[in-house]
Amino acid sequence: MTPLRRALPLARWVVGVAAATAVVLLFTLDGEPPEATPSLAGEIDRMVEAGELIYAARCSSCHGTEGQGGQGPRLAGTVATLYPSTADEIAIVTDGRLGMPPFGGALTEAEIAEVVLFTRFGLG
């Protein structure tokens, strides 16, 4: 199975969560948020927080504690430009690239999704 095919279900899930969040926000701008909003927002926050712990343990030694770069490239403020497609970033984290080691065997798909969400929304 190719790396992209392995990452595709996870990428679809991440995109689905983002789309669901956008829909919930769209319908809650003029009124009270529906009851599902806190749980969805809470799940995204939980994933970003989990991703922060993974990043600190597995990524910060190369990309810097604040994503400022070092041995690896700067991620803070640039990751969405470097990898406009979340699936591309997931594939790189999973399979590695150039000097970056693959984390597909060391991290679960959920953990990779969490660290990718953190690099996109948790780094400055």
Image (cartoon, helix red, strand yellow):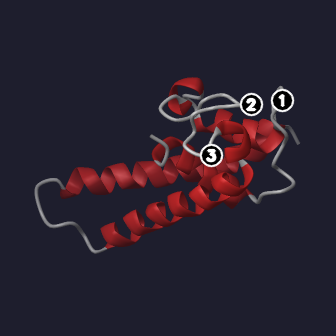
Mark 2, other Cα within 10 Å: few <14 / some 14–19 / many ≥20: few
Gap between marks 1 and 3 measured at Cα:
23 Å
Q: What residue lies at 71% left-to-right and 57% top-to-bottom?
A: 57
Q: What residue lies at 65% left-to-right and 52% top-to-bottom?
A: 55
Q: What residue lies at 50% left-to-right and 66% top-to-bottom?
A: 46
Q: What residue lies at 81% left-to-right and 35% top-to-bottom?
A: 100
Q: Nearer the viewer, mark 2 or mark 3?
A: 2
User: Does label 1 or label 2 sit earlier along the sequence?
Assistant: 2
Q: Pointers 1 and 3 in contact (CB under 8 A)?
A: no
Gap between marks 1 and 2 measured at Cα:
9 Å
Mark 1, other Cα within 10 Å: few <14 / some 14–19 / many ≥20: few
Secondary structure of the residue carrying numbered label 1: loop
- Kind of residue at badge 1: Gly
Q: Which residue is mark 3?
A: 11
Q: Nearer the viewer, mark 1 or mark 2?
A: 2
Label number found at residue 99: 1
Q: Pointers 1 and 2 in contact (CB under 8 A)?
A: yes
- Kind of residue at badge 3: Ala
Secondary structure of the residue carrying numbered label 2: loop
Q: Is residue 113 above or below residue 95?
A: below
Give the side of residue 58 with respect to residue 75, left or right: right
Gap between marks 2 and 3 measured at Cα:
27 Å
Label number found at residue 71: 2
Taking depth in this image into account, of 32 and 68 the one nearest to the observer is: 68
Q: Position of residue 91 (x, y in %)?
A: 74, 38
Mark 3, other Cα within 10 Å: few <14 / some 14–19 / many ≥20: many
Q: Is residue 43 above or below residue 72?
A: below
Q: Is residue 32 above or below residue 97?
A: below
